[in-house]
Amino acid sequence: MPLLFAKTTSPITRRYYRRLSGPWLLMVMALVLVGCEGQQSALDPAGHGAERIAELFWWLVGGAVIVWVIVVGLAVYALRVNPGPHPERQTRLLIIGGGALFPTLVLAGYLIYGLSMMPDLLAPAPKGSLEITVSGEQWWWRVQYHTPEGDRVALANEIHLPVGEPVQFHLESPDVAHSFWIPALGGKMDMLPGRTNHLTLHPTRTGVFTGACAEYCGEAHTLMRFYAVVQEKEDFDAWLEQQSNPVASPATPLTQRGEEVFSAHGCGACHAVRGTEADGVIGPDLTHVGSRLSLGAGTLPNETSDFLRWITHTETVKPGVHMPAFGMLPEADLHALAAYLDGLE
Ligand code: CUA
């Protein structure tokens, strides 16, 4: 750019471009590349699907850089080195070759390369693989594990996966269109009312990764996140076993009071707590809610104070949420309720 405009721009603009092309540009690029790392980055892959997608991305970037260098090189040549006039034959060759033939060949190459990935990305997991149904709902994730003993493990906003194994997801929605995406593990897949879509993820390294809804689904769309925890097989098995168990009875007077408050105010009409009378299916299953990494689908951390904040200020924490706030309860009851919920581990 600085070279190209050297003749046609003012000295001040030229100085600006020269500055921009120096260390500043390098710093900006470094900052941009740092953004590629992290638990929600498709360019820091931790799964087979994400690895293929990252590979495609870098081939596209590499190709784009080469094309950019060629085009800018030709522009510099035409403006600075040999300003013309150019023979008509040369111009025609450049327009047909560079303007039509070259882009067609390059884009066709990329299309073939991209399409050749599809069977791999869309292949179902082998029979006998772990199966999980995830339902995207305004604005949280209902998760159901299918175990050999049946569909006992239900939770919300958190998915645990064993490393090195393909997992078959069945993706649904009862309300509007959502999209299930864990960028570090694989591609995204729509969740549509009235149909079940399928996605296979194959994590390749352990870690905690974040997922998000990738389709605008209403007011709290940006607050519809979840965690995917990839574990060694034995840790995963232990987690699944623990999640399969009903909750233990509350052990302290405070949490016992909390359970009474939970029951007296009808929380069980919407929420289930396995091992108690609460068996609602409208909202998230709270059986082991205290053991999860977040509250309100990635909106808050998971301390007792966060439970308190959530229960009393649902609408402020997550505008549009269907759960009403219960700030009108006596303060002592609210503290007991928060302690009870946090104790459900
Ligand atoms: Cu659900 Cu956006």
Image (cartoon, rainbow, N blue to C red):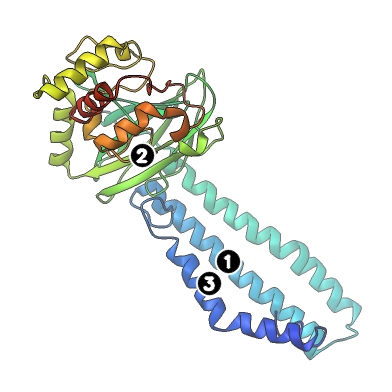
Identify which residue is drawn at 80% across, 66% down: 96
Distance, label 1 to label 3, CA atoms, is 21 Å
Indicate which disc, 1 or 2, sits on the residue closer to the N terminus: 1
* Residue in front for this viewpoint, 34 or 85: 34
| Quarter assignment of residue 289 | top left
Identify which residue is drawn at 17% across, 45% down: 232
Distance, label 3 to label 2, CA atoms, is 32 Å
Q: Is residue 88 above or below residue 339?
A: below
Q: How far across and how far down the image is residue 187, in percent?
A: 45, 43
Circle number at residue 28: 3
Horizontally, is 294 left or right of 172 in the view?
A: left
Looking at the rendered image, the quarter that the C terminus falls into is top left
Label 2 sits on a secondary structure element that is: loop
Q: Is mark 2 within 8 Å of ligand 1?
A: no
Circle number at residue 300: 2
Label 1 sits on a secondary structure element that is: helix
Name the residue tied to disc 1: 63
Q: Is mark 1 within 8 Å of ligand 1?
A: no
Question: In the image, what residue type sits under mark 2?
Answer: Leu
Q: Is residue 156 above or below residue 18?
A: above
Instruction: Kindly report which numbered mark, 1 or 3, lies closer to the viewer in this rendering.
Output: 3
Q: How far across and how far down the image is residue 334, in percent?
A: 28, 24
Q: How far across and how far down the image is residue 172, in percent?
A: 44, 24
Q: How far across and how far down the image is residue 125, in percent?
A: 33, 34
Q: Does the residue at mark 1 contact the one at mark 3 (Cβ under 8 Å)?
A: no
Q: Residues within 10 Å of mark 3 (few under 14, many from 20)?
A: few
Q: Is residue 246 visible?
A: no
Q: Residues within 10 Å of mark 2 (few under 14, many from 20)?
A: some
Q: Residues within 10 Å of mark 1 (few under 14, many from 20)?
A: some
